[in-house]
Image (cartoon, rainbow, N blue to C red):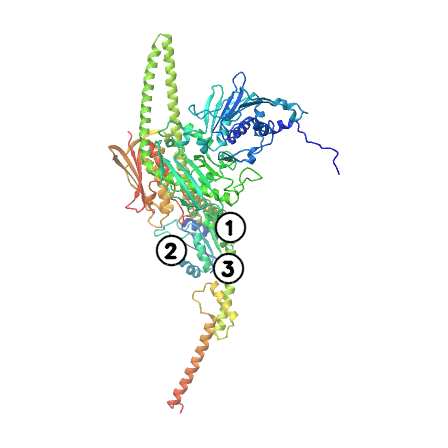
Amino acid sequence: MKPTKKKRLSIDVGVIASLGRDSIKDHTTAILELVKNSYDAGAKIVEIEIKTHVKDPYIRIADNGSGMTEDDVDNNWLRVGYSGKRKDKYSDKRRKTGEKGIGRLSADRLGAILEVRSLTPSDGAISIVINWKKFDQMGKNVEDIEFDFYNKDVQIGIPKLSSAAPDSDSGTELIIRELRQEWTKSDFDDLYKQLSMLISPFDNQVDFTIRLLTGEENKHQDVVASEISNYFEVKLDATFDPSENTVIYNMWERTPGSSKRVKVSTKPIALKQLLTNTEYDINPDDKKLGQVRVILFYYPRNKNTILGSKLKMTELNSYLNSAAGIKLYRDSIRVKPYGELDRPGGDWLNLGYRFAQNPAGRGRANHRIRPSQLVGAIFFGRDDNPELSDSASREGLIQYDSFRMLYELVRGCIKLVEARSHDIFVREEKLFEEEDEAVDKDLETVNKKLGNIRDDMQDISKTLSKHDDREVKAIGETVAILVSKMNYATESIELLESQTRLYRGLATIGIASAVFGHETQIQISRLVSAVNIAKDFLLLSPPKIPSSVSNIDTAITASQKVMAWGGFALDRIRRDKRDRNTEKIGGVITRIIDDLRGAFEAIDIEIDDRKINSEIESKIYQIDIESIILNLLTNAYTACRQVNHNRKIMVRLQKHILQKKKGFTIIVSDSGPGVNEKLRSIIWEPAFTTKTTKKGASEEGTGMGLAIVDGIVEEMKGTRKVEDDAELGGASFEVWLPIIE
Amino acid sequence: MATIGVIDDRNEDRQIIVDGINLGKHDDSWNVVDNKPLTNLEEYPAWISENKICSLVIDELLNEKVNGGNAVEYKGHDLVDYIRKRFATLPIFVITSYSNDPSLRQRFKDVEDIVERQVFGQDYKNYAPRIIRAAQQYLNVFQTELNELSLFAQRAATGEIISNEEQARAQAIQTKLDIAYSIGTISDISVWLHEATDLVDKIEELRKEIEKKTGKDQ
């Protein structure tokens, strides 16, 4: 059958608004789309200027990319839905980001008028002005809308990487006017963050710079190119070579306090050597993964990270809060949500869970890095790794074997960083200790000077208050207020110190409860059972009086032990123990031993406290000394349980002059199995524990007791050590503290 | 007298269990014996046999008290493992303050019950009859099987031939009841009796031969 006539599909102008203005989530996203176009045009720099506090607010996005000829404008730019990127996926080694051909329409989301200026060597500068308001006239066809085009006397501003760089002969500048939305500070912050995440921070530093000029003060920020990123402690740049099934890597480390980055000698490592103890059951010899590059920056996020730099801790934290995470880049474009730590799936390597399982400090060889301490990027190409493809149902990649292999590869690389970080820590530990001492001395000096100033001000205040002159009196009053504020600040600091002591005391009670609390539970059971049985013996006919009395005796003894523990726990945190008073140290220690003796005797541990010098006096916080002795005794108790005979603990207190300073030494030794020499330097770290079951199956200790002792000793400017005890055969913990009169 | 055995390293707690069972039992024919943990696991079979233990009550942490010598090097769950290899059906109750100990919980299928010490102290009148009932059932089976074995032994002793099936049954009972002194296999005894009878006959013939030669019969 022959058709009567031909019909055509016509497109209403409203479609343009639907594709552009209405489909773009917000104005930040709209800018991102336009920046992506600049990137795809091969630009080395894109400049974004957002001027909202001028008479005629505007947004300017300019780049030094390839620009457009008039022909390009006609056949590409003005053809909605056309994308040259589908035909030519690469520009200047970059894989192009957009393929839909509608990114340019997002300009409609930003403002009603768009002027596109473009420069090419062949056509020179041209310009076209798009008035998006024309697309609001419903009923008109898209083809009916016309725009003004210029190819003469067009002024165009092409950005340069530096003022010394030669002028570019190509580029594009978009000027958007009649802005549709206000820009707030949080919008600018969000834009900055989004821009920094759009393109790899790693490649961006050499390949693509985004310059952002915002706000009234025209504040200029080079997005991503940040000095902070250089203050890593360890950097790893590894490439997986699938042909050799090997990881070739370079590593750099930076000693805290130094700006020098030292390259560490490394050798290629076979994949199967790197992938040990994997979470997934994978075979490293399966050729599932193509070439992958892994770049990791590790920042411990402590004061040593910024030591010797001009950075502030807040700046480092702010940088890491936005940059931390291990991001995936396929052909240099982000694959979300990997590495966005505030989103589900962001911590895709489960580093947080891994750390929670093993929260030990860096002093331990198997310590784990937290996700917030790593800035990382994984680069791979779609052509090398076709299996690393997008999931159709949600954000992210399909979790084929190749993804699992990638997961284990990156975790293996993180283990390399962790091992290096541990080495640095062990090496530098001594140095830090010395520096901490210096800092402590400085703080002491500052405190003294502040005290002197306060005294002087008090004197001035008194003198001025006697003066007749009204102005002088007013100054006197101001000085008095300052003195009062200083006093308040001092009291606040003292209160905080007191609270710290309370928390340490409470933590100690908690640890002791975990160890001795079970003994109390046994006594409670015994008390309840014995009372019941005593009663039933009495109810027999005839009653069995001796058996009843025997059980009542058992119940009474058990009740005394229960009450003793309750009293002991309450007594430890009494308010007055958090005040600094002159106390007899021996008395404090003996009272603790007496309170605990029953719990020790219950499992046949003998405590020998005959060598406690009862005359030593010092101005101390009683709660601190109690925390030290209680934690050391708790340790000794656990150690003694591990041997099946001669369970004995010896507590000694003696005067001891150390480096010409008068002091006293508390020694707690036991007949347990002792402490392995290799562990002696790290047992003081939080979360480290040697208290495993006999079969080593599960840990019984909290790993906090000795860390508390260490904290108190450091605060009191004392020393501590652990050695073998020649007499009892176990460990001997020794704490020296200065006598304060 | 059939007995309940109690093993605990803490004297007071051991006595509480003994008193609790004595108060809760309804049958005076049952005796309760108690002991500190024995030094070696290998000592238990003899202790159980000598005391005719029909139900065992133990603690989990048996190694807390040194008791003037050495604390033992095993825990309650180790004892359960050992006993089960020798006395597959002997009832075992664990009364402990460590009822949630993972190693112990793994043996839940191997014991009659794991009871929190305080729960037993409050409710021994219900637990004691359970312990006795389990012991009684064990004793009943034990006596039936012992009688069966005794019959086999008697038949063997009189020289009656025991069939292969009967021999297998007798061996199974011996193994189950852990009869260490074992009368040997039933078939060994039958053979031995036949051989002995033959020997006696031969000696008799020899005696007659000697008398004949010495002319005694003349």
- Residue at label 3? B138
Q: Look at the numbered disc 1 and give the secondary structure of its residue.
A: helix
> Against A416, is A151 above or below?
above
Q: Where is residue A22 in the image (x, y as percent from the top left)?
A: 61, 28
**Going by the image, does A667 lie left or right of B177?**
left
Q: Position of residue A162 (x, y in %)?
A: 43, 25
Q: Quadrant of residue B210?
A: bottom left
Kindly report the distance in space between the C-alpha atoms of the residues bearing marks 1 and 2: 31 Å
- Residue at label 1? B125
Q: In which quarter of the image is the C terminus of chain B?
A: bottom left
Identify the amino acid type marked 2: Thr
**Mark 2 residue crowding within 10 angstroms, few (<14) / some (14–19) / many (20+):** some
Q: Look at the numbered disc 3 and give the secondary structure of its residue.
A: helix
Q: Decide: marks 1, 2 in contact (CB < 8 A)?
A: no
Both on one chain, marks 2 and 3? yes
- Residue at label 2? B39
Identify the amino acid type marked 1: Lys
Q: Nearer the viewer, residue A427 or A624?
A: A427
> Against B122, is A255 above or below?
above
Q: Which of A344 and A217 is in front in this view?
A: A217
